[in-house]
Image (cartoon, rainbow, N blue to C red):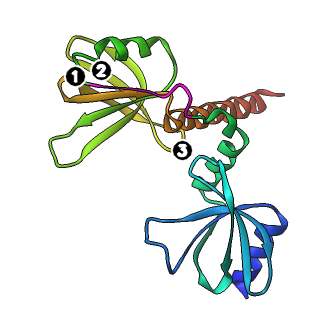
Amino acid sequence: MLKQRILNDAYVNHKLIAFRTEKEEWGETIIGRVKEITPQHITINEVDEYGIPIGATTFKIDALINIVIEDKTLECLEVLERKNKQLTKKGCTTFWGNGYELKGYISARLKERKPITLFVEDGDADDTNVIGFVKEMDEKSVLIEMVDRYGEIDGKILVPLETIMGIRWESQEDKARLLLNRSRQMESTNIINCSQTP
């Protein structure tokens, strides 16, 4: 059976996998490495969205649906797993207030090459988080180079200070995106160095 073959391969090769079961909502996914497998059951060493171990869980193999292997999210989680000791909540700082009150904190992040999160009012019922590097700032707005959840640069956005409701830095999310961004930079540097080798 194909399902059993994929799970056995993940077990033998110690691959991260993701799946849902019938009991999970569409947004919920189990992620981890196969610890043990029998014809009826599978035990997974689960990790959270930052690659931090959260314990072992056993499932019926028949209950597993939508098994994912070797995708971009799992690739990023493997990077975070290796560096998860850096993903502590220690140092996480949040300030609430309007952007004009927070200008000094935002400006201080200009000198750092570390992502921050801006909590931005977008006019709808939902508010938006903008995560990225502070590139420039003037009296009325801040330019953020956005970093997506894969650590890739995802364009720039000019955020008016009047729409900012809060700022956060050194959160697990900020640190994870920084680690992934640095990992991608190292990969691209290695590719460039390899291509320049005679």
- Residue 132: image location, x then y, percent: 43, 30
What is the three-letter code of the residue carrying label 2?
Val
Magenta-drawn segment: 89-96
Separation (CA) of disc 3 from disc 1: 27 Å
In the rendered view, tell whether residue 23 sits above or below residue 116: below
Label 2–label 1 contact, CB within 8 A: yes
Q: Is residue 155 above or below residue 6?
A: above
Tell me the element at label 2.
strand
Residue behind mark 2:
142
Which tag, 3 or 2, sits closer to the chain's start? 2
Comparing marks 3 and 1, which lies closer to the viewer?
Answer: 1
User: Which residue is tagged 1?
Assistant: 161
Q: CA distance from mark 3 to mark 2?
A: 23 Å
Question: Looking at the image, do the residues carrying marks 3 and 1 touch, with CB atoms under 8 Å apart?
Answer: no
Residue 187: quadrant of the picture: top right
What label does residue 150 carry, if any? 3
Q: Position of residue 76 (x, y in %)?
A: 62, 47
User: Is residue 54 one of those drawn in magenta?
Assistant: no
Circle 3: residue type: Tyr
The earlier-in-sequence mark between 3 and 1 is: 3
Quadrant in the picture for the N terminus: bottom right
Q: Residue at x 49, y 28 (%)?
A: 92
Relative placement, left or right, of 77 versus 158 is: right
Q: Label 3: few (<14), some or many (≥20) within 10 Å?
A: some
Q: Position of residue 178 (x, y in %)?
A: 56, 31
Query: Residue 180 bears which disc, if any?
Result: none
With 110 as the anchor, is 20 left or right in this view?
Answer: right
Secondary structure type for disc 1: helix
